[in-house]
Image (cartoon, rainbow, N blue to C red):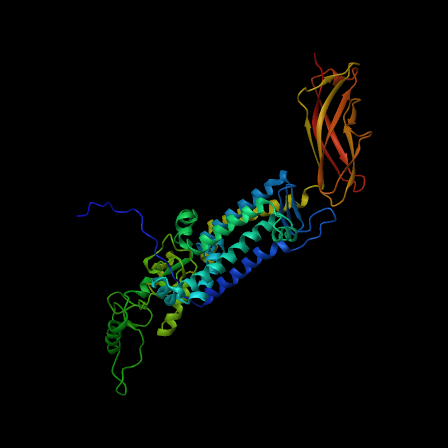
Amino acid sequence: MSDQPNSLYAAREPIFPRRVSGAFRRLKWQIMVLTLGIYYVTPWIRWDRGPSLPDQAVLIDLANRRFYFFWIEIWPHEFYFVAGLLIMAGLGLFLFTAALGRVWCGYTCPQTVWTDLFLAVERWVEGDRNARLRLHKAPWRARKWQLKVTKWAIWLAISIATGGAWVFYFADAPTLLRDLLTLRAAPVAWTSIAILTATTFVFGGFMREQVCIYMCPWPRIQGAMMDDGTLTVAYRDWRGEPRGKGLKRQSAETEITNAAGPQIGGRSPVVPMQYRDATGVIRPDEPQAGKGPGDCIDCNACVNVCPMGIDIRDGQQMACITCALCIDACDEVMEKVGRPRGLIDYLALSDAPRERAGGAPQSLWRHVLRLRNLIYFGLWSAIGVALLVALFLRPMLELTVSPVRNPSFVTLSDGSIRNAYDVRVRNRLGEAHEIELSLNSGDRLTLDVEGEDIGTFTVQADTQRLIRVYVTAPADVPAARIDRTEIDFVVTDPTTGETASVATSFNGDAR
């Protein structure tokens, strides 16, 4: 008996998925082209907001603390819009997982999209599964080095493009590209590109399934989102078992066919893949354990196309991302052997007893339109509507007032009391506007704007201006002698007629 302790970790076995064609593979190609197109092209879309504003359609302007998305502009104090979108994204993920399993992981997750792209490059350079297996086992000679270096070079080019596209979202894309080409870009741009290039190259090329299994938390969370009514990729074992192939399968089929009836013209009647049920009746579509081979011919096509390297016939597994490529591979084999498609399919575990008994599964909508899914959809929709209402009702002119607390008031030489306030005015319009500031109070309080002769000042387009405002109460008015008096600051845009007001208080000397 060896004294060496057993290792808790196993070395990674490289996975070489085989090329497959089918409806789900085409859907994945379409989604990959769409998502990558959006990612790479979006920073170059122009959007006219006026002469003083950036013309990039989607821009995260950290320097000026703005987020531009086509006609929408988010200011720092409106972070609740971003929080709302994140909540909607989470609820949407819950909704799709509860209804259709890990469709996000299988089709639109960035790790999946870039892994699919890297796998396409790998097949183009090195060949399909068998060729890549032979190359993997071959010694490191000139041809192997040539193929590997070519593949890595293309991967690296894709990774650089990925990192470069990301930084274009944070600055004017044409200007930043010119700075990058002339080596005048800021160090933060080069650092961001280097980090994203490295992570894309490593994650998409060398850590593909490991990112999904070990680094991503979602496989462990999905168990709380799914139940036996969730549609997910699964294997109809009641139809596929027991498996058989080769001479063993042919022998079993011959025995069952001979039991079907007398020979016609010296040949057995054509009764492909038939099975005898418990009552002795020959039924073509329902294999019974111990009564002949099932539909599965144990060809391992579903395993060979899986990017995670799992066998879906072993049941639900954490590593499965429900990409459905095994469905395409199995359907292709079933057509070749003359059996119905759907041995591996999107199905709900709650339908298993009904299908085992020969019944039909529930409709797609019965699984999707369940109470939990409707609750998720209702919450998702309510948050979306609330964000839209808040977006369209927000004013173009905003005002915030912060009283200066140290000191809370100043007693002037004539006995009058003066308070200071920091007033911030935001102009969301695309051009500069003259703004009038006034005070709404019952007492004879006077207002002075620091640096301005009158209570009118200019706020530039799509900016905010901070001014210091002094409010003075003469000694003979009640506001100067009581502890606190409620007042309102009012700003007015004479051009548009829009107004905004904020209530605050005036502190007097009550001693």
Give 31 or 45, whichever is nearer the viewer.
45
- Count of numbered circles in the view: 0
Residue reaching furthest to the right: 453
Residue reaching furthest to the top: 511
Look at the image and tell me whether residue 272 can be seen.
Answer: yes
Give 235 or 171, whichever is nearer the viewer.
171
Place of residue 145 in the rendered image (x, y in percent of width and height, measured from the top left): 41, 62
Whether residue 411 is situated above or below residue 495 in the rendered picture: above
Whether residue 477 is situated above or below residue 354 in the rendered picture: above
Side (left or right) of 359 relative to 198: left
Place of residue 62 in the rendered image (x, y in percent of width and height, measured from the top left): 62, 42
Q: Residue at x 74, y 49 (%)?
A: 50
- Residue 311 image-quadrant placement: bottom left
Place of residue 123 in the rendered image (x, y in percent of width and height, measured from the top left): 44, 65
Residue reaching furthest to the bottom: 265
Residue reaching furthest to the front: 142
Side (left or right) of 135 relative to 1: right
Give 208 or 2, whichever is nearer the viewer.
2
Look at the image and tell me whether residue 302 can be seen.
Answer: no
Q: Residue at x 54, y 52 (%)?
A: 163
The C terminus, quarter of image: top right
Place of residue 227 in the rendered image (x, y in percent of width and height, measured from the top left): 40, 51
Give 511 or 68, whichever is nearer the viewer.
68
